[in-house]
Image (cartoon, rainbow, N blue to C red):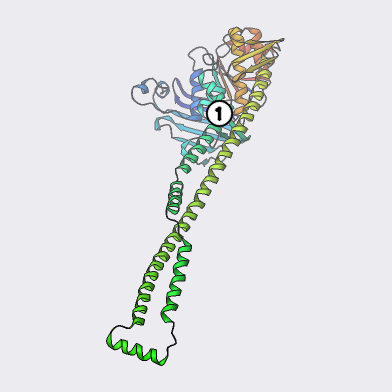
Amino acid sequence: MKIKEISIDGFGKLHNFHTELSDGIQVIYGRNEAGKTTLRQFMLYMLFGLEKGRGAAARKDDYTRYLPMDGGRYGGFMVVEKDGVSYRIQRDFLSGNQNVRLFVEDSMEEIALPGQSLRGTLFENSMEAFQNTASMTQSDIRAGKEMQMILQNSMANLRSSRDARLDIRKAVNELKKKRREIRKDPVFRQNEQLRQRLGEHPFDEAKLGRYEAEEEALFQKLHQKKEESLFQRILRWIRRLFGRDQEEIRQNEIRHQLEVVRLEKEHLLERKKEVQALEQEYQRSFRGKKAAEQEIHWIDQAIWAIETAAANVQKTFGEELNDKISEIFGEMTGGRYEKAVMNPSMEMMVKQGSRYIDMKYLSNATAEQLYFALRLAAGELLYQDDGFPLFLDDVFGNYDDQRLKQTLSYLGKEKDRQIILFTGRREMINIMEEMNIKFHLTAL
């Protein structure tokens, strides 16, 4: 991304201000209080928005600080180029942080902005990331806690491709949350309860078989016909005249036994239906439980795979970062130091000869060069897709002429990135002219 044009209606001390910027190195020159930092903050807030604070904090926030001194409109527009296309960003800060419009410059076709933010449409990264890797001042050139957090989070990021990053911690936490939710699924409790019920009241299939056999035997016994002689039939007829027939008594007893057996059988059949229904419910519950257990298994496998890949990526990214820091730092120091490294504890060291030197033993200027190299390297590796311009606001105050020449020489070789230098030092301009470093000058 490159900033091509800036037009300010009103922002702090800048009023009806207009300038065009070039590729490569752009120098914004002005003495103290000329508005260099104001211009830098305008560019920053045009990209990311300017939110108004609330309560007592609002009296000292940037929204209040940069209210136009002469009143009038608060905002303006900025033209940027991304991937060969020019876009116009238009903001009215008085209307709130969300009032932003984006147009294709050539056709003035407006582009819809989900969430009223340029992030996700024109670029992907946050203002915090930009400020820590692409916008530097003398006071914040040394890596602070925010920079360390960005690097720690970035080194914990699994980069599934150059175009997509997955936050490992977030991904793993989401998977663990899903696993906890699955383990709370009622299917586990239901399955155990059903298993216990089946164990406490098993169905006795053999007992049902015995009742069925007994029923059949009694039925046959009830309907069997005995062969009787004439005398026996006459005798049975006489008995009927004087009292109950023994055969009738026998049959009644059989019928009673048969009724008892049938009732027991019906009870067992009902019980069988209940157990069968319970078993079907248990099988459904069991299948649900197995599916949940399988999902937990795959979640465990995913967590393991992500964490394993993350460890490999951390190592690879750490090596890439150290190589890039060494390359930049080596050029800025004229090859005095062979290598610069950041260890897992975020501590910086440099190699000179056969020994490593802790950063705390370096001079302030050398330490600042090292941190400068760190920020450049981190921005190049982490946010290369956005390709933000590099904002440098009087960052070389502790550099002697030799360090300044070496650093400017390195920056002059950056062909693809726009570098915007804000300075009040005329000698820096003179040095670039002496070294034939191409730049475009805007004087405030």
Residue 5 picture quarter: top right
Residue 277 picture quarter: bottom left
Mark yes or no: residue 304 visible. yes
Residue type of the residue flagged with mark 1: Glu
Q: Nearer the viewer, residue 224 or 12?
A: 224
Mark yes or no: residue 19 visible. no
Q: How busy is the neighbourhood of tag 1: few (under 14 within 10 Å), some, or many (20 plus)?
A: some
Residue 341 picture quarter: top right
Examine the rendered structure and indicate whether residue 43 appears above or below residue 117.
above
Q: Nearer the viewer, residue 351 or 217?
A: 217
Q: Position of residue 110 (x, y in %)?
A: 51, 41
**Tag 1's secondary structure?**
strand
Examine the rendered structure and indicate whether residue 438 appears above or below residue 354.
below
Q: Position of residue 325 (x, y in %)?
A: 65, 19
Q: Residue at x 39, y 91 (%)?
A: 231
Tell me if 302 is positioned left or right of 33 in this view.
right
Q: Position of residue 198 (x, y in %)?
A: 45, 54
Tell me if 120 is positioned left or right of 52 in this view.
right
Q: Residue at x 47, y 39 (%)?
A: 180
Dot 1 corresponds to which residue? 5
Q: Nearer the viewer, residue 277 or 334?
A: 277
Task: Give the tally of numbered discs.
Answer: 1
Where the N terminus falls, by quadrant? top right
